[in-house]
Image: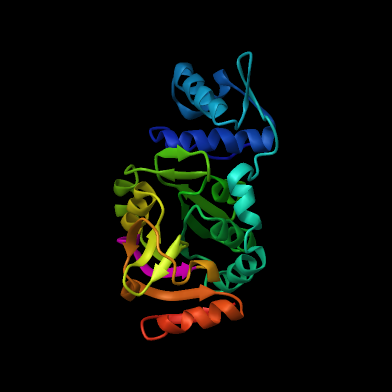
Amino acid sequence: MAPTQAPDSRQPEVRRLYLLNLLQQEGQLSVRSTSEALGVSEVTIRNDLTLLEREGLLQRTWGGAMQRQQLRPEGAFMARLQEQRDAKERIAVAAARQVHDHDTIFLDASTTAYYIAQQLKERQNLTVITNGMYTALELGPLPAITTIVIGGQVRGDNGSLVGTLSADLLAKLQVGKGFFSARGLTLAKGLMESTIAEGQLKELVINHVDQVVAVLDASKLGSTSLTSFCPVTAIGCLITAGDEAARRAEMFHRHTAVVIG
């Protein structure tokens, strides 16, 4: 079944995710019908398809495109899904307990967020804002969940969307909880990311959420990275899992609530 409502076609990243979602559901699409559905030119759709083909996400055909393969995590993202998998799945279960019907939440582009998304499929009237392509594809087909994509440029190595195209959209939204993974967390630097673009987007989102929830496995606790995007004092809750994580998380108890999954 095709998506029942076309997205705001003025946002290229939203439009391209719609195309991927359509391919996931239908297996193929035509340039003509898609341009009519979105209210944009056929040239625009062709350009979108060309870009997505370069990312390895579809295969161009005469007059349209077809699904190259099941649109599911692959490459570097798939490899990271297997790292600390048990801990990430336990973190996801604990995080999902904090999400209720009718909530509006943010999920980042991390593998932990992807596992959280898998735990939320039975929620009703849930709104999920994300810069994660794979997370959006996981939730997009579900009629009871509204999925809003933010970001701009696609990072093909991890399926994240980064950029400053999110500011105007976020200003119009009231987000309850934001679930953030990170490359590291220390008392001195807070949450840290490995790229400036990723850190900037997360910092922007944090300005529009009521509560920051850090979702980190043991390997991230006490580790550092390139750029800080949230001080430890701004973290409302830290969710982690495992005995080693519990030991490493002791230093953060004075600054935030800690949940061990």
Q: Main secondary structure of the magenta part?
A: strand
What x and y, as percent, mark residue 243? 60, 81
The quarter of the rendered structure image containing the C terminus is: bottom right
How many marks on residues?
A: 0
What residue is at 52 percent from the left and 22 percent from the top?
A: 50
The coloring applied to the image is rainbow
Q: Is residue 232 above or below residue 24?
A: below
Q: Is residue 211 magenta?
A: yes
**Magenta extent:** 206-215
What x and y, as percent, mark residue 203? 32, 57
What x and y, as percent, mark residue 166? 34, 46
What residue is at 37 percent from the left and 86 percent from the top?
A: 254
What residue is at 46 percent from the left and 84 percent from the top?
A: 250
Q: Is residue 36 visible?
A: no
Q: Is residue 230 magenta?
A: no
For residue 224, which quarter of the picture? Answer: bottom left
For residue 233, which quarter of the picture? Answer: bottom left
Which sits in the foreground, 113 or 244? 244
Q: Is residue 57 visible?
A: yes
Q: Is residue 241 above or below residue 80?
A: below
Which sits in the foreground, 205 or 226? 226
The quarter of the rendered structure image containing the N terminus is: top right
| Residue 14 as seen in the image, left or right of residue 122 | left
What x and y, as percent, mark residue 76? 59, 45
What residue is at 46 percent from the left and 16 percent from the top?
A: 43
Which sits in the foreground, 152 or 103? 152
